[in-house]
Image (cartoon, helix red, strand yellow):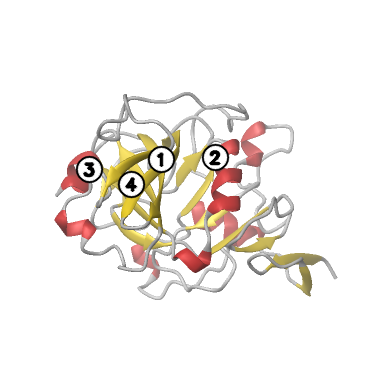
Amino acid sequence: MRKFTVTLSCRRPVRHGAVRHGIATFLACGLLLTGVTACDRENEPEVSRGAPGAASARPGQTVGMRLPGVGDRLWSQVPAGTGQAVVVYGERRDSPDSLVVLYQKQGPTWVRTASWPAHNGRLGWTDDHRMDDGRSPVGVFTLTDAGGALADPGSRLRYWHDDNAYMTMLPPEQEHAHDFDYVIAIDYNRLKGVPPFDWSRPDGVDKGGGIWLHMDHGDGTSACVTVPEPGMKHLLRTLDPARHPVVVMGDREHLAS
């Protein structure tokens, strides 16, 4: 029987039996992806689009008591105990281009610690996401489970390694086939504490699901948010379940509302 590895937080991997889940991954993100391949650059440049003040902001800069560019509606949904926030600043409501910024709380203030160019749904954003609408959902969502086709790179989140479950159903020679080498499940319409490829949809299949942070392929997605490989590794190694990480995501107009 084929095996997959589950890593619980900072523990060493434990092996469990598993069944073939490749079709679940195909359905999860739909693979309605276009564009070039995942980035593998070691050092991503600072990007001026998306985040308020991003042109001058640098890693380690204190940004204040609130997350920049996040208005009262979404800020009220960030749990009081959250100490890490991944903010996805969408360029425009109908744009697939965005900027991902990692903020971490130090005492009462938030500090910007890293950022990467990113992509979201190929048709932009929506506050009423539906399956196959080509838009990423706007909102605040917890981050509890991760995984990928590659072995755990040191994830603090529970990591479900299964080289078959995350297959893209594309020929292996295509670099696009590596989009799911690393993924972090966004807790939108999913059960927590299960693999990202789990097909459970508590709010119904029509509300979509299987929305992840995963490897960037250079263009918009079905609904996921993509980050270059160095960014995915950094997030996996940094996001700490003890700090209750969340993702705050949307286009700038939605975020500021």
Mark 4 and mark 2 lie on one chain; the one further toward the N terminus is: 4
User: What separation in Å lies between label 3 and label 1 (alpha carbons)?
Assistant: 13 Å
Q: Residues within 10 Å of mark 4 (few under 14, many from 20)?
A: many
Q: Residue 133 at what x, y percent from top left?
A: 33, 50
Regarding mark 1 in the picture, which secondary structure is present there? strand
Mark 1 and mark 4 lie on one chain; the one further toward the N terminus is: 1
User: What separation in Å lies between label 3 and label 2 (alpha carbons)?
Assistant: 21 Å
- Residue corresponding to mark 2: 231
Compared across the picture, whether 49 is left or right of 256 comes to right
Along the viewing direction, whichever of 203 and 90 lies nearer the viewer: 90
Q: Residue 26 at what x, y percent from top left?
A: 57, 54
What kind of residue is marked 3? Answer: Gly
Regarding mark 2 in the picture, which secondary structure is present there? helix
Question: Residue shown at 37%/63% (left/top)?
Answer: 82
What kind of residue is marked 1? Answer: Val
Along the viewing direction, whichever of 58 and 203 lies nearer the viewer: 58
User: What separation in Å lies between label 1 and label 2 (alpha carbons)?
Assistant: 9 Å
Q: Residue 223 at what x, y percent from top left?
A: 40, 48
Is 200 rendered above or below residue 98? below
Q: Residues within 10 Å of mark 3 (few under 14, many from 20)?
A: some
User: What separation in Å lies between label 4 and label 2 (alpha carbons)?
Assistant: 22 Å
Q: Residue 11 at what x, y percent from top left?
A: 71, 68
Proximity of marks 1 and 2: CB atoms separated by less than 8 Å = yes
- Residue corresponding to mark 4: 135
Q: Residues within 10 Å of mark 2 (few under 14, many from 20)?
A: many
Is 44 rendered above or below residue 245? above
